[in-house]
Image (tube, grey):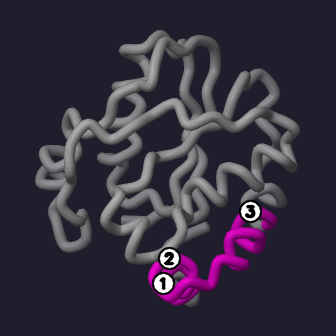
Amino acid sequence: MAYDGAVPTFVSAWKEHGLRTLAQTAAELVAATLPAPSKASVITYIPPDDDRSIRRGHHPAEALARILASRWQLPVQPLLMRSRHVERQRGLSRDERRRNVRGAFRSRGSVGGRIVLVDDVYTTGATVGAAATALRAAGARRIEVVTFARAVR
């Protein structure tokens, strides 16, 4: 889904204003658009930033991953953790975003096979890129990224 029109308002309501039920709607839209990953062994998600999760009271990427995992009949596992605090990405350039998240994730252990990595919004790819680097370092052979929305440039 392109991150334009009504989508930013939807995402803001879901992420920043606590409308958790929108995760179900987001997952239904993703599942209606994408076929279930046929060769994936597990679904994981971008791990929460503790400060933002506490303030929000929920973690949108995890909720989206759990609902998709149920629909696609795949296990969901928290394969990643934050290795350091990351400043907010909003307002940063592509290069600044990459620097901001470089080395920000690490695997919780060794992983293998094909992994579906879920995040709520794909802007420049910096966050999922850094997370995928950590998963590959832990042994993942293939990583498919799934998001609810993507910024189109």
Is 86 placed above or below 99 here?
Answer: below
Of residues 78 and 30, the one nearer the viewer is 78
Quarter of the image that includes the C terminus:
bottom left
Q: Type of residue at label 3?
A: Ala
Residue under the point 20% across and 51% down: 85
Question: Mark 1 touching mark 2, by CB under 8 A?
Answer: yes
Q: Which residue is mark 2?
A: 15
Judged left or right of residue 36, residue 102 is left
Q: Point out residue 69 in the picture as x, y percentages from the top left corner.
A: 77, 44
Q: Which residue lies under the disc numbered 1?
A: 12
The image quadrant of residue 23 is: bottom right
N-term-proximal mark, 3 vs 1: 1
Magenta range is 9-28
Q: Secondary structure at mark 1?
A: helix
Q: Position of residue 39 (x, y in %)?
A: 77, 21
Residue 127 in the figure: left or right of residue 57: left
Residue in front for this viewpoint, 136 or 122 = 136
Q: Toward the viewer: 100 or 106?
A: 106
Contact, mark 3 vs mark 1 (Cβ under 8 Å)? no
Q: Which residue is mark 3?
A: 27
- The residue type indicated by label 1 comes to Ser
